[in-house]
Image (tube, grey):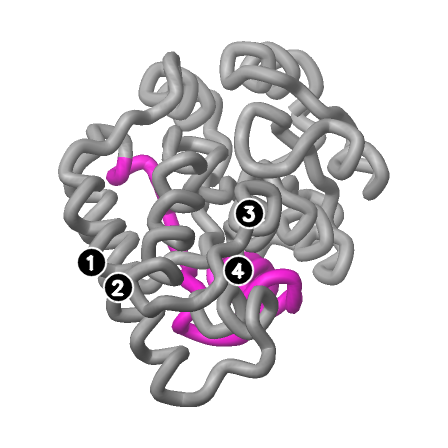
Amino acid sequence: MKNFDLIVFDWDGTLVDSTAHIAQSIQKSYSDNDLPVPDEAAAKHVIGLGLLDTFNYLSPNLTKSQHQGIVDRYRHHFLDENKILHAFKGTSEGLQALAERSYLLAVATGKSRVGLNRALKKVDFGHLFSVTRCGDEGFPKPHPDMLQFIMNDLAVPPERTLMIGDTTHDLLLAKNAGTYSVGVSYGAHDEKELVGLNPLACVDSFERLMAWLLENG
């Protein structure tokens, strides 16, 4: 008997190897605007948040003009260097295996709807997701809105839902929505940060994530 009916994945850093690219795009956007550049750790910490929360967290005293300038340059750098998406090894096969076992699959991401739709066209597993929810369609992580929307849409209760992500924002999203979670340490946040939020497991590769899901899901 399955422990879960619905498995919800974060996107960047969980299914797609984009952590370094996002952090570098954040840093370049500050440099282009002649503002102090966040270090790598700070740039990685905000991955998973919506753009508004990302730059408010990094620089709470930005003027409206500075904020818009950073957002514009971030989008430029991210899109310019993100022409090819690199999913983690085994992602397509793993998601297909879960779908064949009748799990409902979904995505909860801080990306914009335009950004996620663009990304979904570049992978061969987008059709496997029953629902996707983005950071600009409601309250961003770690507010429970994303998971609540997905669960309501698919009529699955929190106790039958599993959230998987590479950041503390993902695990806090799960906690706030009353669902279970699994952390992956191959993305933006390290294992110590993730384990501190008491996920059911924390794994260091997509291959090990799949092994855990097939045994415990």
Q: Please state which of the two labelled residues, at mark 3 or mark 4, is closer to the viewer.
A: 3
Q: Residue at x 63, y 26 (%)?
A: 185
Q: Nearer the viewer, residue 210 or 198?
A: 198
Q: Residue 117 at x, y = what percent?
A: 23, 54
Tag of residue 49: 4
Residue type at mark 4 is Leu
Asked if residue 6 can be seen in this view, the reply is no
Q: Which residues are the magenta region?
A: 126-154
Dots 2 and 4: beta carbons under 8 Å?
Answer: no
Q: Is residue 77 above or below residue 162?
A: below
Q: CA distance from mark 2 to mark 4?
A: 17 Å
Q: CA distance from mark 1 to mark 3?
A: 20 Å
Element marked by disc 4: loop
Q: Earlier in the sequence, mark 3 or mark 4?
A: 3
Tag of residue 39: 3
Tag of residue 73: 2
Q: Residue 121 at x, y = what percent?
A: 16, 42
Relative horizontal placement of residue 159, taking residue 62 as reference (left or right): right
Q: Earlier in the sequence, mark 1 or mark 3?
A: 3
Q: Residues within 10 Å of mark 2 (few under 14, many from 20)?
A: many
Q: Residues within 10 Å of mark 1 (few under 14, many from 20)?
A: some
Q: Please state which of the two labelled residues, at mark 1 or mark 3, is closer to the viewer.
A: 3
Image quarter where the C terminus lies is: top right
Dots 4 and 1: beta carbons under 8 Å?
Answer: no
Q: CA distance from mark 1 to mark 2?
A: 5 Å
Q: Residue at x 43, y 42 (%)?
A: 11
Q: Earlier in the sequence, mark 3 or mark 2?
A: 3
Residue type at mark 2 is Arg
Q: Quadrant of residue 72?
A: bottom left
